[in-house]
Image (cartoon, rainbow, N blue to C red):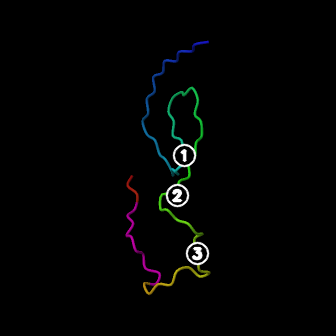
Amino acid sequence: MKLYVQQSIHIHMIKIGGMTNSSVFQIGTSGQILPTSYLYNTGGFEEPAPEPEKNGPSSSIGDDVLVPLTAPGI
């Protein structure tokens, strides 16, 4: 069975709260979306990662913000 879909989409504003690596943002129709995930050892690591420190990494910087953030524009 062949199905043909004709669409006319008018978007006045889109607000996306967040996207991750496996997010799908879709407008309109799609025949099929298959989830895929691939894991590669691109760093050539051969042993497990070290255990994390209980109180976080030690730093002499303190609680200062390292990257200045601006308020979102409206």
Q: What secondary structure is the magenta-colored segment mainly?
A: loop
Q: Tell me the number on the disc at residue 41.
A: 2
Identify the amino acid type marked 2: Asn
Q: CA distance from mark 1 to mark 3?
A: 29 Å
Q: Is residue 6 above or below residue 51?
A: above
Identify the amino acid type marked 1: Ser
Image position of 70 (left or right of 42) = left
Q: CA distance from mark 2 to mark 1?
A: 22 Å
Looking at marks 2 and 3 on the same chain, the residue that comes earlier in the sequence is marked by 2
Report helix, strand or loop for mark 1.
Answer: loop
Magenta-drawn segment? 62-71
Report helix, strand or loop for mark 3.
Answer: loop
Q: Position of residue 30 (x, y in %)?
A: 54, 28
Image position of 17 (left or right of 74) = right
Q: Position of residue 42 (x, y in %)?
A: 48, 57
Q: Tell me the number on the disc at residue 23.
A: 1
Is 35 or 14 nearer to us in this picture? 35
- Residue drawn at point x = 48 percent, y = 21 percent: 7
Residue placed under numbered mark 3 in the picture: 50
Identify the amino acid type marked 3: Pro
Q: Is residue 16 above or below residue 1?
A: below
In front of the other: label 2 or label 3? Answer: 2
Q: Do the residues bearing badges 1 and 3 touch, measured as CB atoms within 8 Å?
A: no
- Residue drawn at point x = 51 percent, y = 40 percent: 25
